[in-house]
Amino acid sequence: MKEIEEQEIQELESQEYFINMGPQHPSTHGVLRLVLSLDGEIIRKVEPHLGYIHRSIEKMCEHDSYQQIIHLTDRMDYLSCHMLNEAVCLGVENGLEVEIPERVKVIRTIISELTRLSSHQLWWGVMGMDLGAITTFLYGFRDREMITDIFEETCGARLTMSYNIPGGLMFDIHPNFQKRTKDFIVHFKKKLPEYDKLLSDNVIFRERTRGIGVLSKEDAISYGVTGPSGRGSGFSCDVRKHNPYSAYPKVEFREILREEGDCFARYKCRIDEMWESLNIIDQLIDNIPEGDYKVQTRTVIKLPKGEFYQKVETARGEFGVYIISDGMKSPYRLKFRSPGFSNLSALDKMSRGCKIADLVAIMSTLDLVIPDIDR
Amino acid sequence: MDNEKLKDFILKQIPAADFEENAQYLLAIVPASHIHSISLELKNNPETRFDYLFCLTGVDYPDHMQVIYHLKSTELNHYTVIKARIDSREKPEIDTVCDIWHTAEFHEREVYDLFGIVFRNHPDLRRIFLDEEWVGYPLRKDYKDPYNMIEY
């Protein structure tokens, strides 16, 4: 009897089939369509289809002045808007050879780290929700609210900030800025251990992330996976350490590296990075030097002929601005190297052999922002 | 390896290579036909070990096109930029490097989509952002779109 059953099972052929995930799937965090080739519930291949919100920002930049380009960048990775603005400004300042006041550098660094914190808080909340825990979303947004309030008071916007201009900042910081930031640090240092208690130590969460979506260090480098996703695989790629800009050479912080390369390692990298961000802000917030908040640049900025590559570390990884200038008021060609685009290319490699539910965890830990990928 | 040594290294591989001065990184301009061999050598040679391709893009010039590769070695911590010059604008073709750096697969699809540069031996060369039916290559300088673009 048993023999017959086994024979029957062998005769049943399995057939690969396709299923569309997205473009309106909640866990894709935007309009990303994945075509999954499945064998039963096992993923054989993942093919991302992009371009639902492709706006051709690079083409628009070829007609815009450098001041206008800054406002386009924060529509790409809206969660790391300040860092993207900073990247363009640093590139332009680099080309103009303008020396930036220390005060600007310090303020830019503090705001960058606040942006990184707010991005990671949102990621943490959404990651929990992807895996079935609603509470994390509320926790993440509760703490994020304090940062967006600080941003609102500083520059008037809560999401797409555009606080930088070539040569410095648009306005000086608000008189309340230091106090509110310090209040936030005190508050968040108490709340961050709760994040660990709620999610990191949760057995179900650990089971769903440990050993899932493993990416080796060699693959991380080859696919260009940067940011916390790459550092979770042991790829030392923190631009703040390797090509320090603004006030980063002056502060002490650790580059978080883990060896495992699975979802939990990437998750833990971001949690530890939040501690490091708090640490950086702690060092700078009482030491903002006096001085001007901007250097006057010309109204029409013309970069000298040549090319300038500027990279910064956003919340998702290494962001590069590549400007080729022919001496006119707009760049001849401008390329944004967005971290999400490269990180996404490794998704297929990571998720082969996993289940669909694992794919959701993998995508959450890659922390994809679709406008950043589509540009 | 510093820039002078790198320059000699690339010159030894490709005597026809040109270099641009006063740049942030060492810029080497090579003919498109050499790109696969020089990439393989730069990746595998123990003295260079360029294992991280952090940016790949194209540029359209009036009489030729370029594909630009930004390379970094994570072990030896040096940088270089290779520019492959493609002389034809009508039928631009170049060898793929996505067997050397996996990240090139998506980036080359993007360059194909927006510039129309064909990458030979690419495993899956399709448009990545635009529709398959889209006519033309938007990032080319002579691209015209009366509906979506404003003339300056």
Image (cartoon, coloured by chain):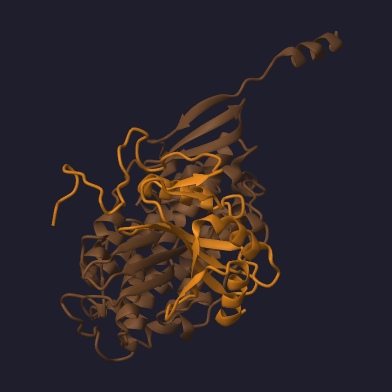
Chain colours: A brown, B orange
At a point 69% along the width and 66% down the height, the residue shown is B45
Residue A161 coordinates in the image, percent (x, y): 26, 65
Which one is nearer the viewer's eye here, A89 or B136?
B136
Taking the image as drawn, is residue A338 in sight?
Answer: no
**In the current view of this chain or complex, which residue is farthest to the bottom?**
A290
Q: Quadrant of residue A353?
A: top right
Residue B1 coordinates in the image, percent (x, y): 62, 79
Which one is nearer the viewer's eye here, A359 or B128?
B128
Taking the image as drawn, is residue A125 in sight?
Answer: yes
Which one is nearer the viewer's eye here, B44 or A246?
B44
Q: Report the label total.
A: 0
Which one is nearer the viewer's eye here, B39 or A347?
B39
The relative height of residue A287 versus residue B151 in the rendered view (above or below) is below
At a point 61% along the width and 50% down the height, the residue shown is B99
The relative height of residue A190 versus residue A96 in the rendered view (above or below) is above
The relative height of residue A30 versus residue A289 in the rendered view (above or below) is above
At a point 47% along the width and 78% down the height, the residue shown is A244
At a point 83% along the width and 8% down the height, the residue shown is A4
Residue B105 coordinates in the image, percent (x, y): 52, 48
- Left or right: A271 in relation to A259: left
> Image quadrant for the N terminus of chain A?
top right
Residue B142 coordinates in the image, percent (x, y): 25, 51
Q: Quadrant of residue A52?
A: top left
